[in-house]
Amino acid sequence: MKIIALVENISDGSVKAKHGLSFYIETNKHKILFDVGPDKTLFENAKRKNIDLTKVDTVIISHGHKDHGGALKKFMEINKNARIYLQKSAFDKHLVKVLFLKIGISLDKRLMNDQRIVLIDGDHRIDDELMLFTANSNDSFHSQANMNLYAGKQLDDFRHEHNLLIHENKNVVFMGCGHSGVIRILKSFSEIRPDYCIGGFHLFDPVSKKTVPKAQLDELSEALEQFNDVKFYTCHCTGTDAYRYLKDRHKNISYFKCGRQFEI
């Protein structure tokens, strides 16, 4: 399995950085985009990495925020064949509160009726290699960085968020922002133990520019002790301060910068 970060907040120097997320993944059976980022950054960086996006056959949009799905319209213009998977509520109205205003961060609803769009409700197996799943654990960890995110008039409950499990020689979990909480997500499996977990932990609020309180970092750090055998590659909404804090306590956590590539 080959994985390349095509959109992420911090660059390794080979590509352009952008607040958002997109991973390009090659498996035995698929060429996948997990999220597409907010804008043209995906296409510029893919060109620099010699990745032909017209060959992608599967797109997973992790949740209904435009920093993860804003480039979807442009992608659909250049790729006519890929099937695109979203939770059915991903096209609902989503907003972020900035001071006293709520600003829209929704996906382009005009795309939802395209025949390539696959709207699902809850967990969904694509094939024997790919599984989409929602966080269904009862773990209570909920990041304070979620508190300015809304679905319509209500605080977002992130029912529009799903994660990807790829099963080849290893079990690899991909998260977008992990709004539901990385511990909840990892506890969603009863029979499968992930070997890798890749994605954001949502511990940084890009509006206030603040990391969650130390008490929350301590709580998460303690909970991560039960996953010392899992290799974490975090990024994006984790934030650099929270990453450094967790890295100091967990040798199995690394940062996945934009432009970086590795194989499993």
Image (cartoon, grey):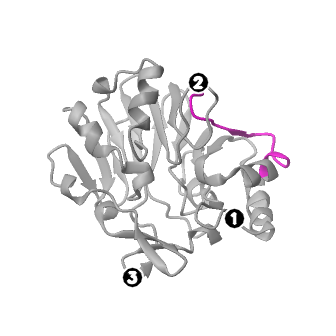
Task: Judge whether residue 190 is colored magenta.
Answer: no
In the picture shown, does residue 214 fall above or below 242? below
Q: Position of residue 46 (x, y in %)?
A: 43, 26
Q: Residue 255 carries which label?
A: none
Q: Dot 2: what SS?
A: loop
| Residue visible at 48% across and 36% down in the picture | 23
- Spatial CA span between label 2 and label 3: 41 Å
Magenta range: 246-262
Q: Residue 14 carries which label?
A: 2
Q: Earlier in the sequence, mark 2 or mark 1?
A: 2
Q: Dot 3: what SS?
A: loop
Along the horizontal axis of the image, is 141 left or right of 135?
A: right
The residue at which mark 1 appears reads as 210
The residue at which mark 3 appears reads as 153
| Residue visible at 75% across and 40% down in the picture | 252
In the picture shown, does residue 218 fall above or below 55? below
Q: Which of marks 2 and 3 is in front?
A: 2
Occupied quadrant, residue 134: bottom left
Q: Which residue type does callout 1 highlight?
A: Lys
Labelled pair 1, 3 in contact (Cβ < 8 Å): no
In the picture shown, does residue 11 fall above or below 95? above
- Spatial CA span between label 1 and label 3: 24 Å
Q: Dot 1: what SS?
A: strand
Along the horizontal axis of the image, is 66 left or right of 113?
A: right
| Residue visible at 31% across and 44% down in the picture | 72
Q: Residues within 10 Å of mark 3 (few under 14, many from 20)?
A: few
**Residue 263 visible to the viewer:** no
Q: Which residue type does callout 2 highlight?
A: Ser
